[in-house]
């Protein structure tokens, strides 16, 4: 591999900027901007190491390896904070990076788009951005293939939009096209070739057209089921809590199933049980039991043996062959399941079924035990960890203080586990909190971790995920085993029929708490959703009317404000939308401003470089800068004219300044002496700036603005000053 020539630092800088601009295509895929900030730091350090290594004479391939070697060091510093810099064990820092990568890959598996912007995922994205930037730099500088380098940048811009069906913003494509053109132009300048304006414009148009065609032609490999008509609402690969929020917000009400029960009672149908809580997210219990039909149905933990003698049957019919995904809706606790055609496996602790083979589900019948808990039974019951289920009470140590203090304040008057649970439920339903599916997504706390719960307690707006996770966490803090269940609320009764219809709008999440001798018991902390159990009544004086179990989510989405927090009830609904729109609008304005400012910044950098190299390049650089400034201002500098002819033309444009005319004459004479004789001549920065100031003072404000934002000379004059008089007639520039 040939050694990269000198002057490649500017190319490397443009490569880094282009990759970071293209990486903004991940904004619809990952919440927040932490990942982009860390990517900026990692990319800058990696490319600086690569460019510095080339500067001291290392081959391009070796420089690229050195640049890549900085990535794990930077990631270790980010993950470990100041401890790495303060002398912490390198092994500990390396283990922290590996653990962060492991958590990020696990999140990719269970999360869905848009993913939570966790610190671990930010680390993984930053590492990927740095690797891509170093590779693009190696291709552009080391292999001297700038067009191939721009293809890497374009790929970064369009692949996320296609892979996750989020699309690519048109303004982003425009910014990437501008960055790609700048990359080609700066590389040509480094190699002593002047890029043609027509060629660059054609190349940019082709790049945009190709990117748009790729967006249309390429298939979408990971299209979400939410976008596919008739697809299952909740599947097995995504975290059910995160998918639930997306499905509630997507707007379309998709029929899922209908059911009839022997006693015509409303039934909650469960899809997944989540007990493993890391502090960042809840994870569904794995399907660790035997296959359906080949092993006995697992026993419900803690349920009394008498419950199995009192059962009821529920007949469930899917709305279509594809409406049931990888999780089979079941009432709790199921004692038998018959008629299922697909292959499913039990999850023993939560009594849910997950698919592990192909096949349509068809209509099926579930028999479930009747566990009739009463308030007096629950108040008299003790609590302990279910056998072999230590996860149900596990909590990380870094619980935000707002969660602990709020739980203590809400439960200070409760004397037993049941009253503690009832106090938490009723505080969440007493009117101070509102049901809102949009605000969490708009304000960046759409999730289920401790940080999300802390923000939810402050904003007091969220949907079932936030209420369920808040109650489960607070219950665990008070010593009560708790978990979250994702499934469907009972649905609506068909007119003239005993059957109930369940749709995607009935998706719901609720907490279950464990009581000795009774088992897992459902609570309902979400206002306006679900049915409050008879054993967990609401204080009638503090709660607004609750819709019936069959009420549609549209009607229940916004509970009636109460006097307990009138300001919050009046103002909270539009805050998230307004803030999100403001942030998006500000981002678009900044992006447009950056694109518009780029040509002017490049032109200023070129002028600074020319004036800084007057001693090396001589008057040729000064004369070239005068000609380019005149072109930018719209003044005549026709090619082929002699330096004296150009001097005469420009002298008329300097106004009545004899100092500027004298400076122009000195610069012309020095340039002619350098071009036509071997006698060295000097050109001063003061003379150049004096002439430029005089020329700018004689044109209109509009001409000066155009010269600043869209300098005409930029792409036509990107060539080393010392070669100006070699490639064109004297004075032509």
Image (cartoon, grey):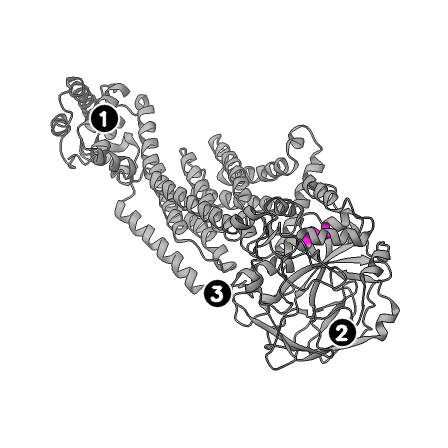
Within 10 Å of disc 3 (Cα), the crowding (few <14, some 14-19, many 20+) is few
Residue at image point 42% right, 53% down: 169
Circle 2 residue = 292
x and y percentages locating residue 373 in the rendered image: 81, 64
Relative to 281, say whether 72 is above or below: above
* Quadrant of res 518: bottom right
Residue drawn at x 55%, y 50% as measured from the top left = 569
Q: Position of residue 13 (x, y in %)?
A: 44, 37
The residue tagged 1 is 692
Q: Is residue 472 magenta?
A: yes
In front of the other: 420 or 39: 420
Q: Which mark is residue 477?
A: none
Q: Secondary structure at mark 3?
A: loop
Magenta highlight on residue 50: no
Quarter of the image with the C terminus in it? top left
Q: Secondary structure at mark 2?
A: loop
The answer to whether residue 444 is seen in the rendering is no
The range drawn in magenta is 469-473
How far apart marks 2 and 3 lie (CA) works out to 36 Å
Circle 1/circle 2 CB separation < 8 Å: no
- Identify the mark nearer the N-term, 1 or 3: 3
Q: Are marks 2 and 3 in contact (CB under 8 Å)?
A: no
Q: In the displayed structure, does residue 245 sit left or right of residue 341?
A: left
Q: For mark 3, what is the residue? A: 219
The answer to whether the residues at label 1 and label 3 have Cβ atoms under 8 Å apart is no
Estimate the spatial distance between the alpha carbons at disc 1 and disc 2, rounded to whole Å. 84 Å
């Amino acid at each position: 591999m040939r050694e990269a020539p000198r002057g490649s630092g500017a190319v490397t800088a443009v490569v880094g900027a282009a990759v970071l601009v293209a990486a903004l295509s991940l904004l619809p895929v990952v919440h927040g901007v932490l990942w982009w900030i860390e990517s900026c730091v990692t990319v800058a350090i990696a490319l600086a190491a690569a460019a510095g290594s080339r500067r001291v004479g290392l081959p391009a391939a070796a420089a690229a390896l050195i640049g890549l070697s900085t990535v794990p060091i930077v990631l270790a510093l980010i993950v470990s904070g100041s401890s790495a810099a303060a002398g912490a064990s390198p092994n500990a820092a390396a283990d922290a990076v590996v653990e962060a990568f492991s958590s990020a890959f696990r999140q990719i598996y269970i999360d869905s788009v848009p993913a939570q912007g966790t610190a671990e995922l930010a680390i993984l994205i930053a590492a990927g951005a740095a690797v891509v930037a170093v590779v693009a730099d190696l291709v552009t500088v080391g292999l001297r293939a700038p067009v191939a380098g721009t293809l890497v940048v374009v790929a970064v811009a369009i692949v996320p939009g296609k892979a996750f069906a989020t699309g690519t913003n048109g303004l982003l494509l425009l910014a990437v096209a501008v960055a790609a053109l700048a990359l080609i132009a700066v590389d040509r300048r480094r190699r002593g070739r002047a890029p043609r304006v027509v060629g660059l414009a054609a190349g940019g148009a082709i790049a945009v057209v190709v990117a748009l065609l790729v967006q249309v032609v390429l298939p979408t490999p990971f299209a979400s089921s939410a976008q596919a008509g008739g697809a299952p609402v909740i599947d097995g690969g995504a975290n059910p809590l995160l998918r639930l929020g997306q499905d509630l917000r997507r707007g379309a009400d998709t029929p899922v199933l209908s059911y009839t029960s022997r006693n015509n009672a409303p039934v909650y149908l469960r899809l997944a049980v989540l007990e493993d809580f890391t502090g960042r997210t809840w994870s569904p219990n794995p399907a660790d039991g035997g296959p359906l039909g080949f092993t006995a149905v697992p026993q419900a933990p803690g349920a009394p043996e008498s419950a199995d003698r009192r059962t009821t049957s529920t007949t469930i019919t899917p709305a279509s062959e594809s409406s049931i995904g990888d999780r089979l809706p079941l009432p709790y606790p199921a004692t038998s399941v018959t008629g299922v055609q697909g292959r499913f496996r039990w999850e023993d602790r939560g009594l849910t079924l997950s698919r592990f083979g192909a096949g349509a589900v068809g209509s099926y019948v579930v028999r479930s035990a009747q566990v009739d808990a009463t308030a007096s039974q629950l108040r008299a019951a003790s609590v302990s960890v279910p056998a072999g289920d230590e996860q149900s009470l596990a909590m990380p140590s870094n619980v935000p203080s707002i969660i602990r203090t709020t739980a203590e304040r809400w439960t200070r008057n409760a004397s037993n586990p049941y009253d503690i649970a009832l106090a938490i439920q009723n505080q969440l339903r007493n009117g101070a909190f509102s049901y809102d599916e949009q605000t969490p997504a708009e304000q960046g706390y759409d999730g289920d971790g401790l940080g999300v719960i802390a923000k939810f307690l402050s904003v007091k707006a969220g949907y079932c995920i936030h209420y369920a996770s808040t109650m489960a966490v607070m219950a665990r803090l008070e010593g009560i085993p708790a978990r979250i269940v994702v499934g469907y609320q009972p649905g609506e009764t068909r007119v003239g029929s005993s059957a109930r219809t369940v749709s995607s709008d009935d998706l719901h999440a609720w907490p279950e708490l464990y009581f000795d001798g009774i088992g897992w018991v459902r609570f309902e902390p979400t206002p306006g959703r679900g049915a409050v159990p008879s054993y967990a009544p609401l204080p009638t004086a503090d709660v607004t009317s609750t819709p019936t179990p069959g009420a549609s989510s549209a009607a229940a989405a916004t509970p009636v404000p109460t006097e307990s927090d009138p300001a919050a009830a009046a103002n909270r609904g539009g805050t998230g939308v307004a803030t999100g729109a403001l942030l998006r609008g500000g981002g678009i304005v900044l992006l447009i401003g950056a694109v518009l400012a780029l040509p002017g910044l490049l032109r200023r950098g070129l002028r600074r470089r020319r004036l800084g190299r007057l001693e090396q390049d001589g008057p040729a650089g000064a004369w070239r800068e005068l000609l380019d400034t005149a072109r930018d201002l719209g003044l005549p500098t026709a090619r082929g004219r002699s330096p004296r002819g150009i001097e005469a033309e420009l002298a008329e444009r300097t106004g009545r300044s004899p100092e500027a005319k004298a400076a122009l004459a000195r610069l012309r004479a020095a340039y002619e002496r350098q071009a036509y004789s071997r006698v060295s001549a000097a050109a001063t920065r003061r003379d150049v700036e004096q002439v430029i100031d005089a020329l700018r003072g004689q044109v209109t404000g509009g001409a000066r603005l155009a010269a600043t934002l869209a300098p005409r000379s930029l792409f036509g004059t990107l060539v080393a000053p010392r070669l100006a008089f070699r490639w064109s007639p004297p004075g032509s520039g």
